Image (cartoon, rainbow, N blue to C red):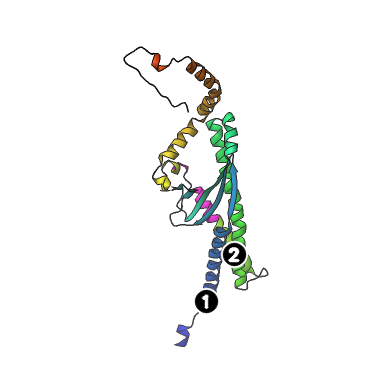
Amino acid sequence: MVNLFKINPKLLHLVKITLIMFFVALTSLIIAQSFTKIDFTYDSLSFSLQSKFSPKGGTLITIPPLGEVYLKSHNTPWQFIFTLKEIDFLKVEKQFASWETTKSWTILLKKVIKNAFVNFFMLALITGLLGGIIALLIFRIYPNSRKFWLGSFIAVTTICMLFGHSMYTFNTNSVNNPIYKGSLSSAPWILNLISLSIDNIEIIGENLRNVPNILPKLYKQAGYISSLGSVAKDLRVLHISDIH
């Protein structure tokens, strides 16, 4: 009767190893998401990219102090967070004279974001592997053991699976249905205005280059305008325009 309730040592060992490897995978994720952060720039804009656990997944774009924009880009419980850190206004001013076409502008932006994701993935692999090694050492599993290499493989595989699934299911059309948070939720037209401006950036640039030629003519024409008091009419119309 005693043998019926005796636990098989091999089964007990298998359960123990399984729990240890689960802890290794979990630790690698926690370390990766806590210490994986990169900074990158696009022209006059500086961003940071990091991640966190989130059941709803997706991509979060933080624009302090205006608020946040959430994109339902993927369902993997690994949320990517872009944060606008700085705007170089002096550089923006210099770029007004040499705006590129919309097509080349968007191609360059996609390239910058792609490079940022590649660098982020490589750093996540390194930090995740370190997290897995730390978990193995806690259980006194050292490099001279097969369990150590198994745990290291599981740590790397966990990061690759989550990141790979996020990229594979990433939906770029999610930018058409953003969810605004904070101050942006009260004024989403601001971003729509920015979007329209980007779509017509070459026209805006051309008009800005024409401003220095138009202003002298405007002031010259203003000099020919007679005083309103000299107009011998019963009806007088004052037309005020915004010269900006």
Q: Which residue appears farthest toward the bottom when viewing the image?
A: 1
Q: Please indicate whether residue 170 sits to the left or right of residue 100 in the image.
A: left
Residue 179 seen in the figure:
no
Quarter of the rendering occupied by the N terminus: bottom left
- The reply to whether the magenta stretch includes residue 105 is no
Q: Residue at left 51%, top 51%?
A: 81
- Quarter-wise, where is residue 20 in the image? bottom right
- Name the element at disc 2: helix
Q: Residue at left 62%, top 62%?
A: 130
Q: In front here: 199 or 237?
A: 237
Residue 159 x, y percent position in the rendering: 56, 57
Which amino acid type corresponds to the residue marked 1 in the rendered image?
Leu
Mark 2, residues whose alpha carbon is within 10 Å: few (<14), some, or many (≥20)? Answer: many
Residue that carries the numbered disc 2 in the rendered image: 132
Q: In front here: 206 or 49?
A: 206
Magenta span: helix, strand or loop, mainly? helix
- Name the element at disc 1: helix
Above or below — where is 13 with respect to 65? below
Residue 187 x, y percent position in the rendering: 40, 42
Q: Please indicate whether residue 63 sits to the left or right of residue 38 in the image.
A: left
Q: Which stretch appears magenta?
A: 160-173
Please give the label number shown on residue 226.
none
Q: Residue at left 61%, top 67%?
A: 134
Judged by depth in the image, the label closer to the viewer, 2 or 1, is 2
Q: Earlier in the sequence, mark 2 or mark 1?
A: 1
User: CA separation, marks 2 and 1?
Assistant: 23 Å
Residue that carries the numbered disc 1 in the rendered image: 12
- The reply to whether the magenta stretch includes residue 163 is yes
Which amino acid type corresponds to the residue marked 2 in the rendered image?
Gly
Residue 9 seen in the figure:
yes
